[in-house]
Amino acid sequence: MRKVRSMVMAHGWLMLAPFLLAACGGGGDGPRVYFMSPEDGGTYPADTPVAFEFGMANYELGAVPENVVTVRDGVGHHHLGVNTDCLAAGEVIPQGDDSWVHFGSGNTTIDMQLEPGEHSFVLQLGDDEHRTQAADGLCASVTITVE
């Protein structure tokens, strides 16, 4: 215990995050994506952008290669669906469509200026060809209100 205490003091609570997630039931074995922000059911002011931050567990986050020869197993990137639903496993996530934002460079954040009202978002993992993955947990959703 003394060693753990000194590690926490030296490196902060970040080192304990995996243990705390597991203890709270959030560290399951399967891959998953999730919204770190915004909070599901949250209310946000219309005069400032809403900050989105995405997380991923038990899967590798990676930028899409310039030339995809073979899809990399266990590697994916985020896609944010705006006022749409999760897509079925194996579907190609639309590009050039206003309802999907691609994060092919491997980034995990975006600020969005939203009109007042209720908005729903889905976070869906895609592979190097932007195809959705079959594992449960690789699509998450939140609904927020902007006033």
Image (cartoon, rainbow, N blue to C red):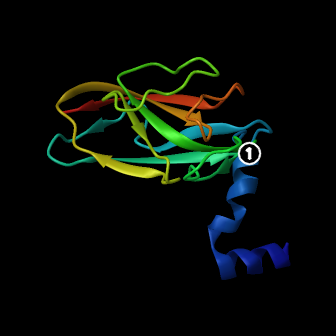
- Quick check: 144 left or right of 136? left
Image quarter for residue 16? bottom right
Q: Which kind of residue does numbered mark 1 sit on? A: Asn
How many tags in the picture?
1
Residue 37 position, x and y percent, is: 43, 45
- Which of the two residues, 141 or 5, is positioned nearer the viewer here? 141
Left or right? Give the position of 78 relative to 20: left
Residue displayed at 34% across by 27% down: 99
Q: Residue furthest left?
A: 47
Compared with 117, 38 (above or below) is: below
Q: Quadrant of the N terminus?
A: bottom right
Placement of the C terminus among the 4 image quadrants: top left
Residue at the spot 62% in from the left edge and 38% down from the top edge: 127
Q: Residue 105: x and y, percent?
A: 49, 54
Residue 133 sits in quarter: top right
Please provide percent x and percent y for residue 89: 64, 21
| Displayed quadrant of residue 88 | top right
Residue 97 image point, x, y percent: 34, 28
Which secondary structure, mark 1? loop
Counting other residues with Cα less than 10 Å from the Cα at mark 1, is it few (<14), some (14-19), or many (20 or more)? Answer: few
Mark 1, residue position:
58
Rendered view: 18 above or below 124: below
User: Which residue is depicted at the point 17% across and 30% down?
Assistant: 116
Residue at image position (50%, 46%) is: 54
